[in-house]
Image (spheres, rainbow, N blue to C red):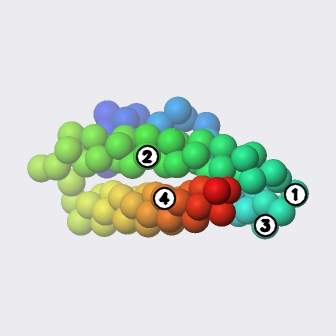
Amino acid sequence: MPPAYQADLPHDKGASSSPTVSLKAFLMRLILAGNLSQAGLIAYLQQRRTQVAAHQHAIEQTAQMMDEGMDLGERLALDYGLAVAGAELAWLDSTLEQLSQMKQ
């Protein structure tokens, strides 16, 4: 991948366009979710949703920028990133909906 494109790719090292919490840390928080208030858990999941949506948007922009010049491996990596982000957003939306219904 050309270096000019690599600089634009989101990295999971605290970049504002990528989820700032590693997957491992996120899963640990979910395991310990029973220690959070329901409002705290909802706020945490909403924050994660915002981060994942920004990450997904950054991947989409990168894919558009690189569209013609991508090789198969680059296309597969970007498609995978979009699929994972989409799946996580769907899960977050569903979970937030369930939690908000429990709150009522």
Q: Quadrant of residue 9?
A: top left
Amino acid, disc 3: Ile
| Count of numbered circles in the view | 4
Q: Which residue is mark 2?
A: 53
Residue at x 81%, y 51% (from the top left corner): 37
Where residue 38 sits in the image (x, y, percent)? 75, 53
Q: Residues within 10 Å of mark 1 (few under 14, many from 20)?
A: few
Q: Outermost residue, front direction?
A: 104
The kind of residue on which mark 1 rests is: Asn
Residue named by callout 3 = 31
Task: Report how far apart the C-alphas of labels 1 and 2 lie in the structure.
Answer: 26 Å
67 horizontally vs 93: left or right:
left
- Nearer the observer: mark 3 or 4; the answer is 4
For the residues labelled 1 and 2, say whether their Cβ atoms are less than 8 Å apart: no
Q: Earlier in the sequence, mark 1 or mark 2?
A: 1
Residue 68 in the image: state x and y as whole percent.
12, 50
